[in-house]
Amino acid sequence: MNDTKNILLAWASSLTPIFASIEGHTLVTLVSAVILPIVFFAIGKTIDVLLQIYLKKEKK
C-alpha cells in the first residue's frame, strides 16, 4: 500500500506539468511530466530496498 501511495503522490505532484504538456503539445514537457516521476520513483525505491538489505546485513 505504501508503494501505491508513493506513486500516486509522485503523479499528483506532476499534475500541473501533465496539463501543461497536453496544452503545449511538446514532447519535452510530456516526457518531463510522465516519464520523470516514474524514473524518480523507481530510483528512490531502489535506494530504499538496497538500504534495507545493507542494514539487515549489518545487523547480522
Image (cartoon, rainbow, N blue to C red):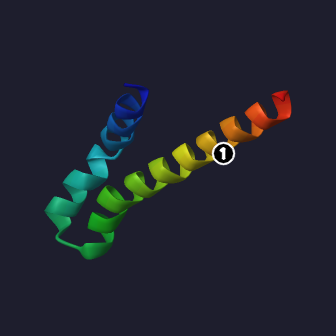
Q: Please say if 33 is above or below 45.
A: below
| Mark 1: amino acid | Leu
Closer to the camera in the image, 11 or 44: 44
- The part of the image, by quadrant, that contains residue 30 is bottom left
- In the picture, measured across the screen, residue 56 lies left or right of residue 40, that is right
Residue at position x 61%, y 40% in the image = 48
User: Which quarter of the rendering shows the N terminus?
Assistant: top left
- Residue 41 placed where, x, y %? 46, 47
- Looking at the rendered structure, the secondary structure element under dot 1 is helix
- In the picture, measured across the screen, residue 25 lies left or right of residue 32, that is left
- Residue 10 placed where, x, y %? 39, 41
- The part of the image, by quadrant, that contains residue 9 is top left
Closer to the camera in the image, 52 or 9: 52
Label 1: few (<14), some (14–19) or many (≥20) C-alpha neighbours in 10 Å: few
Closer to the camera in the image, 42 or 29: 42
- In the picture, measured across the screen, residue 58 lies left or right of residue 23, that is right
- Residue 32 placed where, x, y %? 36, 63
- The part of the image, by quadrant, that contains residue 28 is bottom left
- Residue 45 placed where, x, y %? 53, 44
Hey, which residue is sitting farthest bottom in the picture? 27
- In the picture, measured across the screen, residue 60 lies left or right of residue 47, that is right
Q: What residue sits right under mark 1 in the picture?
A: 50
